[in-house]
Amino acid sequence: MQCRGHRRRMRAVMVRAMSFSAVAALTLNPALAPVLASDYRVAAPLGAEGQMNARFLSLGVGKSIVIDLPRDIKDVLVADPKIANAVVRSAQRAYIIGATVGQTNIVFFDAAGQQIAAYDIAVKRDLNGIRAGLRQVVPNSDIQVDGLGDGVVLTGTAATPIEAQQAADLAARLAGGPEKVVNSITVRGRDQVMLKVTVAEVSRQVIKQLGIDLSAQMNYGTAVVSFANSNPFTAVGQPITNNSAVGSIGQTVNPLDPTKSVVPSVQATLRAMESAGVVRTLAEPNLTAISGESATFIAGGEFPIPTGVTCQTTAAGAVGQCAPSIAFKKFGISLNFTPLVLTEGRISLHVMTEVSEISNQNSITISGTTVPSLQTRRAETSLEIPSGGSMAMAGLIQDQTKQAINGLPGLMQLPVLGSLFRSRDFINNQTELMVLVTPYIVRAVAQKDLSRPDDGFAATSDPQADLLGTINRIYGVPGRSGPTQNYRGTYGFITD
């Protein structure tokens, strides 16, 4: 037992002696320190060519970073000192300072010429001011700011489109212009807006026409006297009724000379019309669009208009058969709107609505083809209203009055008989257009909550249609009952 304890004490003394000799060697010969230290540190990774892999560092202009190295620094290589520079303050500590926007690299070497560390430096503009501004302006958004050359890249998510736009505007102001900002912000949960539009048009048109056309022919022997009077309706541009003979007078005998007869032939056409009507045009389109996107609606048609002539050329170079080129022009009721949800329940809306109809007025004729004109009324506006609020665009009034009197000069001014030699044409057209716009912020609904107009429709059989005159057997949504009504007041039977 004593021998074993003596051996253990001898081993401890030998270990201490070895440790003391190593420390003494380091103290007497400092050059051996890197060699011994390398035995206890993990070797840095080497690249494909035996060089140490470079580490990427991002710095702002005028910013610095402290680098601590595992061995003493003997030499420093800076590729471009104008972009970044390295300052060695102690044997194993260096400072890297960014000077201007660009990219460079810095390599540190020890006394033996071995590479200690290498850094790829990307100097960018200072983005801390932009980050602080975004945290203050849009605190509920998760927006990251990165530098790209002398520009700025915005990534991340924003709660609403207006916050994304505010972030882009702030970054553009601090970066020096919108051309230096790349906006890649994604909006979380983009809202959908349904626009309910009612287009109502009331037109009242009054037409009054009165005219008489006379034509007469009198034969007395070899003498012939003819008379014709036609009074067109110029306000309309074309006669509405065709000429028709009302009556004629037959042969009569000349009392002075019974051998000769007077053959008068008189024809008269009475044209009279009075019309008054009220026309109502109503369209109620419902459109849904994502916030920031546009939606378009049109109810009408297209009519052809000639745009030119296309001719075929023969093999000899001569011009062959020609045919007109046709294009189509749209008309009817059109709607275009672009919604933008600002905050909860507030909607910025740009609305453009147009009502157009074909008219014969101002029409032109090209090569025997009549091209009609379009009467157009258009309203375009931008506004901000809450969800469920309504906006009315009214006052689009059109009042058109035409009146014309045509007749034979001189005779048309006679007090009573002048009506036989003139025509009167009067047209009065009044039209008013009103547009009601109501936006709603909508969410998706289940299919069971929606129904088609033909749900529950069942066509009738031939015997029921022929004998009973019915066209359907069932109509209505199956399984859906009407809303219950609560009656107030006294109801029931009264017994005396």
Image (spheres, rainbow, N blue to C red):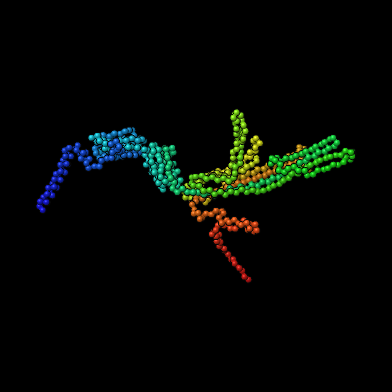
Q: Give the residue at the far left of this rendering.
A: 2
Give the quarter of the image for residue 144.
top left
Q: Give the residue at the far front of this rendering.
A: 315
Q: Give the residue at the far bottom of this rendering.
A: 496
**Residue 36 in sight:** yes
Q: Position of residue 313 (x, y in %)?
A: 59, 31
* Left or right: 306 as drawn, with respect to 420: left
- Say which residue appears at 37% left-offset and 39% top-offset: 126
Q: Nearer the viewer, residue 47 or 34?
A: 47
Q: Position of residue 18 (x, y in %)?
A: 15, 43
Give the quarter of the image for residue 33.
top left
Q: Position of residue 77 (x, y in %)?
A: 29, 34
Q: Position of residue 180 (x, y in %)?
A: 42, 38
* Left or right: 356 as drawn, with respect to 51: right
* Left or right: 52 as drawn, with respect to 393: left
- Say which residue appears at 47% left-offset and 47% top-offset: 342
Q: If the image is split into quadrants, where does the C terminus sit?
A: bottom right
Q: Nearer the viewer, residue 282 or 301?
A: 301
Note whether 231 is above or below 317 in the view shown.
Answer: below
- Say which residue appears at 61% left-offset and 68% top-offset: 493
**Residue 94 in sight:** no
